[in-house]
Image (cartoon, helix red, strand yellow):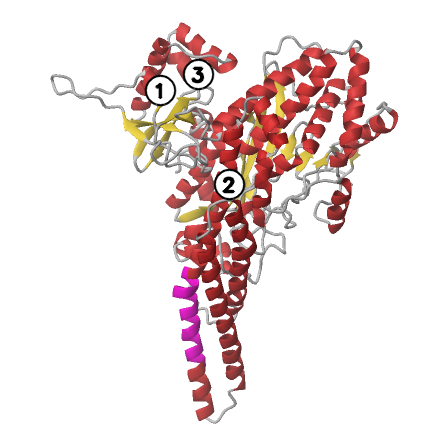
Amino acid sequence: MEKVLNVEKIFGENVFTLGKMKERLPRSVYKAVKNVVERGGELSLSDADIVAKAMKDWAVEKGATHYTHWFQPLTGITAEKHDSFITHPDEDGRMLMEFSGKELIKGEPDASSFPSGGLRTTFEARGYTAWDITSPAFLKESGSGVTLCIPTAFYSYTGEALDKKTPLLRSMEAVSVQALRIIRLFGNHTATKVVASVGPEQEYFLVDKDKYLKRKDLIFAGRTLFGAPAPKGQEMEDHYFGVIRERVGSYMKDLNEELWKLGVTAKTQHNEVAPAQHELASIYETANTAVDHNQVVMEAMKRVAIRHDLRCLLHEKPFAGVNGSGKHNNWSLGTDDGVNLLDPGETPNENIQFLLVLACILKAVDIHADLLRQSASDVGNDHRLGANEAPPAIISVFLGEQLEDVVKQLVETGEAVSSKEGGKLETGVSTLPDLEKDATDRNRTSPFAFTGNKFEFRMVGSADSIASPNTTLNAIVAEAFCEAADRLEAAADFEQAVHDLIKEYLTKHQRIIFNGNGYSDEWIVEAEKRGLPNIKSMVEAVETLTTDKAVKLFEKFGIFTRAELESREEILYETYAKTINIEALTMIDMASKQILPAVVKYTKELADTVLAVKEAGADAGVQAQLLGETSRLLAEAKQALETLKKEDQRAAAMEEGKEQAFYYKDVVKEAMEALRAPVDALEMIVDKEIWPIPSYGDLMFEV
């Protein structure tokens, strides 16, 4: 009989939590740690030594032999360099296991081999990692043994942030400081900080390992670069929330267990819309920890899949013709004394603090829609945004009927005297209960939707880090809070001033509110009339990082310097170009070495068949027609292949930067599509026994 899993017992067992610190540290040291976590500051080196020893002892007891400063460079994934706890043997030859406060606090990885956007050159190698005390250390169990992972920030020798964590932490402090100014105006003097909280939803695909290994495009690019549609896709809508298959369920069970041990609050699991697509959602936690945990989730998904002879695909669009994968970023703000600033209450029309917060957020999103769009940009996400499956590329805000009505009243009359209520949903069945209805519906086409007590930023790509979107959200809202607080703190009559400010912000920025169908062509026309930006691709979004408006915003709150923003701009252009180049080279390799040779083999069989049938005296018209069509598509594919080779070589020879990135987007990607079209058509003709790679049907339905 299978052992019963005790979730309460295993949860967080591989995390060095504050609770474990409380058990293992002297009271004074524990209080010092807790104070830094909650209020900021630095531990003394003597206290850090004590923490390091306790952390090492705990890790060694759990089987750890190594530790690593676990950080998030500008690759979008995590990095780690493992060092063992061993030191020089003593005079008796005994090996000692030691770990000092200095080793805990600071590491020195090579900073020249990570993306730096010109902040570091090849010969300037020194970089530093700094312990993030607010995110707990954890143990990673893998083929290399048990490793103590210490979350850290990553800096260059000259002090610039070379990671995703540092700007996020800076933005969290900025929004906290400015939000405190707002709540102080409403009489809250007990809260000491306002915390940005995030609950990410992670979509992913699972495919069989053996089939995966036969697809070079999945191996090198993470998505299928060729592939004709399967006879069945998602049109029957039967996979969504459907019964989870045994093999997938076994994977999910092991994944949950690993994540729970790592303190990740994996809450929801289900089948998503597309065949072979699934989702995992976690409970809200502090934005910093949520970002770290989402990286842990993505790493664990891939690691656990291998144990089940599966492969986990996190690319935003692994398969053409069916839904891709996103990562809904549920974001909210709450005080450390328990007040959710985005909770409208029973009567939102009377909740002045909420209305001010809402008005500030609408202003922030309207003014910085371009930056918010950029924060969700990556190469893979270009396949989703605006493709009638994810939100459109146009940023808008869904408020729902209740809040839209309140906003309308305030804009038109200056007062909101009522708010709509949810009412009852009558089931019509005597044995079923009538249900309390929410005051508003949901809108799955909105990029930035209010969902009761939070905003759901739905544009983020499945493979992307959620650090950048949350950094941007925190920054733009901090600016709006700051400007509102400046005016209100100077007002002689606060009640009148806040009333006027809410009306002013809502009136000026109501164009960003849209509750309709974001997938419709009419919305594109309407958005253009409203003057909302429609940034259709990653490379078009990059330049928004270094506008005067953006630099002013980020420098004002110390989140990015101009140099840090310019470095990220350069990295993004290079990343785009390199990604498309890899995809193009993979297509060239597959077409040249696998697909075209297979088609040539098939045409020979057809030609032999035509001759044999004719010699037998029968009509070979059908066979000849097939041969002609196959040969025509083969010639088209060969010509497209040569064009792709030429254009990719031309792009690769260009100087790295904006011009090269746009050439890959406008020319090389078009050449890739031109090659894919005849190849996909050939897949529908060529004998399956001859076709060299697994089909969409093989990949999506045989798990």
Q: Is residue 50 above or below residue 584?
A: above
> Label 2 sits on what residue type?
Leu
Q: In the image, which is nearer the foreground, mark 3 or mark 1?
A: 1
Where residue 79 sits in the image (x, y, percent)?
Answer: 39, 34
- Helix, strand or loop for disc 3: helix
Where residue 496 sits in the image (x, y, percent)?
Answer: 82, 14
Q: Residue at x 39, y 12 (%)?
A: 23
Separation of disc 3 and disc 1 at Cα? 19 Å
| Mark 1 / mark 2, whichever is N-terminal | 1
Q: Nearer the viewer, residue 476 or 190?
A: 476
Residue position for label 1: 104
- Helix, strand or loop for disc 2: helix
Q: Is residue 1 above or below residue 134?
A: below
Q: In the image, which is nearer the foreground, mark 1 or mark 2?
A: 2
> Label 1 sits on what residue type?
Leu
Discs 2, 3 touching: Cβ within 8 Å? no
Where residue 31 sits in the image (x, y, percent)?
Answer: 44, 8
Q: Quadrant of the N terminus?
A: top left
Q: Nearer the viewer, residue 670 or 421?
A: 670
Q: Classify residue 600 as left or right of residue 667.
A: left
Q: Is residue 602 magenta?
A: yes
Residue position for label 3: 19
Residue position for label 2: 572
Separation of disc 2 and disc 3 at Cα? 40 Å
Where residue 110 sits in the image (x, y, percent)?
Answer: 34, 31
What are the residue bounds of the magenta stretch? 589-606
- Helix, strand or loop for disc 1: helix
Numbered badge on residue 631: none
Judge whether residue 122 can be spotted in this image: yes
> Label 3 sits on what residue type?
Gly
